[in-house]
Image (cartoon, rainbow, N blue to C red):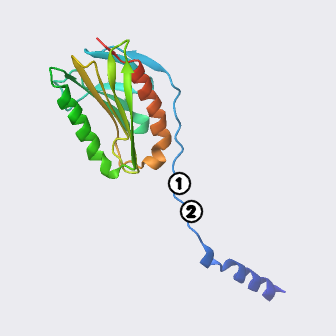
Amino acid sequence: MAVLSITFIAISCDDNDNYLPKPRGYFRIDLPEKTYSHVDTIERYSFECPNYAHLTYDRYSPDEKNWVNIEMPQFKGSIHLTHKPVNGNLGEYLEDVHTMVTKHLQKANGVRDSLISNEEHQVYGLFIEMDGKGVATPMQFYLTDSTKNFVRGALYFNFQPDNDSMQPVINFIRKDIDHMINTFEWK
């Protein structure tokens, strides 16, 4: 009886041919509550920013007082905002946006854009979303009043993006960028 039991155990444990590795798992991402505060410390524009983020001035361009970053440390990302005055050079700024988007198209699977138009606050622009596993900036946009001001924004993460696994965070931030754009005003 003992020999039969040992033989049965040995046979049942030797099934290594059917082993399948488990897929790579990702950490659970806790998304914060959506609340906003009015940001009015920038000279040329204001907007509402999510409370889980904080504003910093661009350390690489200390002379540009209207260039800011909306830092999101829990997501290891930020939204870079740059402001430029419009002096008959709006076409150049629009071409710069086109060039920046084109640089990311190599890794993009798809691109969607939508027009921005807020007549009441004279805020016009374009929002560009790029899908793809390794796209460095999944969202970019620009806002302008067409005569004096131009702001370009882009979402960046501080790591090699795997946008498939980051999609819940990207969707979450997309709603905050939409809110920021909808509350954007020129001064």
What residue is disc 2 on? Answer: 22
**Element at label 2:** loop
Q: Residues within 10 Å of mark 2 (few under 14, many from 20)?
A: few
Q: Is residue 43 left or right of residue 77?
A: left
Q: Residue at x 29, y 41 (%)?
A: 101
Please say if 121 is above or below 105. Answer: above
* Quadrant of residue 5 within the rendered picture: bottom right
Specify the label residue 25 is tagged with: 1
Q: Is residue 1 left or right of residue 67?
A: right
Q: Are marks 2 and 1 in contact (CB under 8 Å)?
A: yes
The front one of 29 and 82 is 82
**Element at label 1:** loop
The front one of 72 and 84 is 84
The amino acid sitting under disc 2 is Lys
Task: Name the residue at the bottom extreme.
Answer: 3
Q: Position of residue 82 (x, y in %)?
A: 25, 27
Q: Position of residue 88 (x, y in %)?
A: 15, 21
Please say if 89 is above or below 165. Answer: above
Q: Position of residue 50 (x, y in %)?
A: 44, 24
The residues bearing labels 2 and 1 have C-alpha atoms spaced at a distance of 8 Å
The amino acid sitting under disc 1 is Gly
